[in-house]
Image (cartoon, coloured by chain):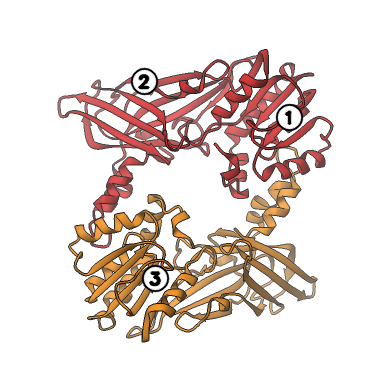
Chain colours: A red, B orange
């Protein structure tokens, strides 16, 4: 993500900071694992207000380089100074790919790089670039694991509201917009009672080892109905974890966990699936960066259900943009 | 507003269409005043999906030119065709300032050009340009009146949440962001029970006669407390009206009216004013387009209260961006 163009408004900043699942997890990871930070050199990729750098400095880091390319870097400098950490934290305004880091290597790279659907408008490539350029052998990336999951939900009311709405707008047929709406995954909060099947792990990425190409992949899935119901959408969400902590730490953005600002990502199905307990939706999801606009994510979903009341096999395309 | 750059997403389109105060008022104005439209040539400025053009066509317009510069113009073309109005509505993709209108004059200009705070990222200048270039003498602009209003509210909890939050963020001092947050008016819904004073009309603009420069002005105000209370913010909102209808029609976006997607605009005060019933806040508000970025609105607020418990006089600056 090109933070320079990113609308890092105060309202958005506050939403992210007030997302306690997000911010408190990072705070706990840092404060409860002082042994990782003590006398270490840390690089904070996409530092924003500098909050993670401040946590690291307070946890005993020797020095923290906070890199932020938006105008927020100027704020971060003031914040670092106001809190008396000017001697520990250096804010660098610029893109990771263009800045001169004053040290040859860092011990730890920390970043909150995750976007909606994990991969939409994310900073992952920037983190991997920094890792390859500056992380010492045996250094730590925080977080170091990120997983994408899939499940299926009943969502009659909302699909009616968001998708079928376009069939009749004040008496007019706007079905061409319905087609567009079907192509765009919806970032929204799903109630856990809507979940009809198991939750399937699609992919785990090891941030300490992966290449940028590993963020494009095809993963197969099998979703087994846990009750008789209808299925209107598949829902994707992600977990991140910090496996280098004294004990495993992390958080999930799934519908069964406390809500975060990432919510979940809803992919509406063309068909309403009438599914019986024990029946399986099998298929695969292919995720790729859009070639023209690398911020966009292209998704191909293949699925089929061979059930008592429903026999369907289909391919749908989505684009997050 | 440069619609080409405007994120006319499907979610936003739906929010605007589902704003029934907005869309139903336009529909009622058009359907209940067929005499205005019968055999007339209409220009729809910033047509979006073409919904207003469809209303006009259905109301008996001879021809409607729907001008839209975003990619939504392609959708509008499909929608016009799907609804059988291709012979009445012509969708023109482009900027008003650059398109070739196939007729020398139009009888009616209709537009939903209003932005947050009426004037933020609005299309008013485009409407005025179209009016001066194409509107026949005695032609009608819909809506033809827009008014900006001001009132004062108690808002302790929300100011704490939005502004004072920055004083202590997970233990760190981010007061430099507090300063920024104070500069940015907040678009949000205000409960009518928070209103402490009268509502004062600041300015009425006559869209059929005004010049672009009339959207920059200084207006004085006097807000009289209707009860003993504290005042944390001033709140601005707008009304629009269609005075050429058979009877006066229009809507208000004020806190005492049904909520719209425009909500209200909250300007937090540096001081908390302790005000007694009958005491007056007097002052003036100066509104100007930002010279560097014409989409931005600069606001200067001067106010003073000479009260029993509070004696304050201050100037504050805000910028909507």
Q: CA distance from mark 1 to mark 3?
A: 51 Å
Q: CA distance from mark 2 to mark 3?
A: 48 Å
Q: Is residue A169 above or below residue A295?
A: below
Residue A36 drawn at (x, y percent): 71, 17
Q: Secondary structure at mark 1?
A: strand
Q: Secondary structure at mark 3?
A: strand
In the rendered image, the residue lying farthest to the bottom is B138
In which quadrant will I find the C terminus of chain B?
A: bottom right
Q: Quadrant of residue B50?
A: bottom left
Mark 2 or mark 1, which is nearer the start of the sequence?
1
Q: Viewer-nearest of labels 1 and 2?
A: 1
Q: Secondary structure at mark 2?
A: strand
Residue at figure coordinates x 18%, y 24% from the top left: A307
Q: Which residue is identified by label 1?
A: A65
The subunit carrying tag 2 is: A
Residue A41 drawn at (x, y percent): 75, 22
The reply, left or right, for residue B304 in relation to residue A198 is: right
Q: Is residue B23 above or below residue B242?
A: above
Answer whether labels 1 and 2 touch (C-beta < 8 Å): no
Q: CA distance from mark 1 to mark 2?
A: 37 Å
Q: Which residue is identified by label 2?
A: A219
In the rendered image, the residue lying farthest to the top is A138
The reply, left or right, for residue B241 in relation to residue B80 is: right
Q: Which residue is identified by label 3?
A: B111
Judge the density around disc 2: few (<14), some (14-19), many (≥20) Cα neighbours within 10 Å. some
Judge the density around disc 1: few (<14), some (14-19), many (≥20) Cα neighbours within 10 Å. many
Residue A70 drawn at (x, y percent): 64, 43
Residue at figure coordinates x 35%, y 35% from the top left: A194
The subunit carrying tag 3 is: B
């Amino acid at each position: 993500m090109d933070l320079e163009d990113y609308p890092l408004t105060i309202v958005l900043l506050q939403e992210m900071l007030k997302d306690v699942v997000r911010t408190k997890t990072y705070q706990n990871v840092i404060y409860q694992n002082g042994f990782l930070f003590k006398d270490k050199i840390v690089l904070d990729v996409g530092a924003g207000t500098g909050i993670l750098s401040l946590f690291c400095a307070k946890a005993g880091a020797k020095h923290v380089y906070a890199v932020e390319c938006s105008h927020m870097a100027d704020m971060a400098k003031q914040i670092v100074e106001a809190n008396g950490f000017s001697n520990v934290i250096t804010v660098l305004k610029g893109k990771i790919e263009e800045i001169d880091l004053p040290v040859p290597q860092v011990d730890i790279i920390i970043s909150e790089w995750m976007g909606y659907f994990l991969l939409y408008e994310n900073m992952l490539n920037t983190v991997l670039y920094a890792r390859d350029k500056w992380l010492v052998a045996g250094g730590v990336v925080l977080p170091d694991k990120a997983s994408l999951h899939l499940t299926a939900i009943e969502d009659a009311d909302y699909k009616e509201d968001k998708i079928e709405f376009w069939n009749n707008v004040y008496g007019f047929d706007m079905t061409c917009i319905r087609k567009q709406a079907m192509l765009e995954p919806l970032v929204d909060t799903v109630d856990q009672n809507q979940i009809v099947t198991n939750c399937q792990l699609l992919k785990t990425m090891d941030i300490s080892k992966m290449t940028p190409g590993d963020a494009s992949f095809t993963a197969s899935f099998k979703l087994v109905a846990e009750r008789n119901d209808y299925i209107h959408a598949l829902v994707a969400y992600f977990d991140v974890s910090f496996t280098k902590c004294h004990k495993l730490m992390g958080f999930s953005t799934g519908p069964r966990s406390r809500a975060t600002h990432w919510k979940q990502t809803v992919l509406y199905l063309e068909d309403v699936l009438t599914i019986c307990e024990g029946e399986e939706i099998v298929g695969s999801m292919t995720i790729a960066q859009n070639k023209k606009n690398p911020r966009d994510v292209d998704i191909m979903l293949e699925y089929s259900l061979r059930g008592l009341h429903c026999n369907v096999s289909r391919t749908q395309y989505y684009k997050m943009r």
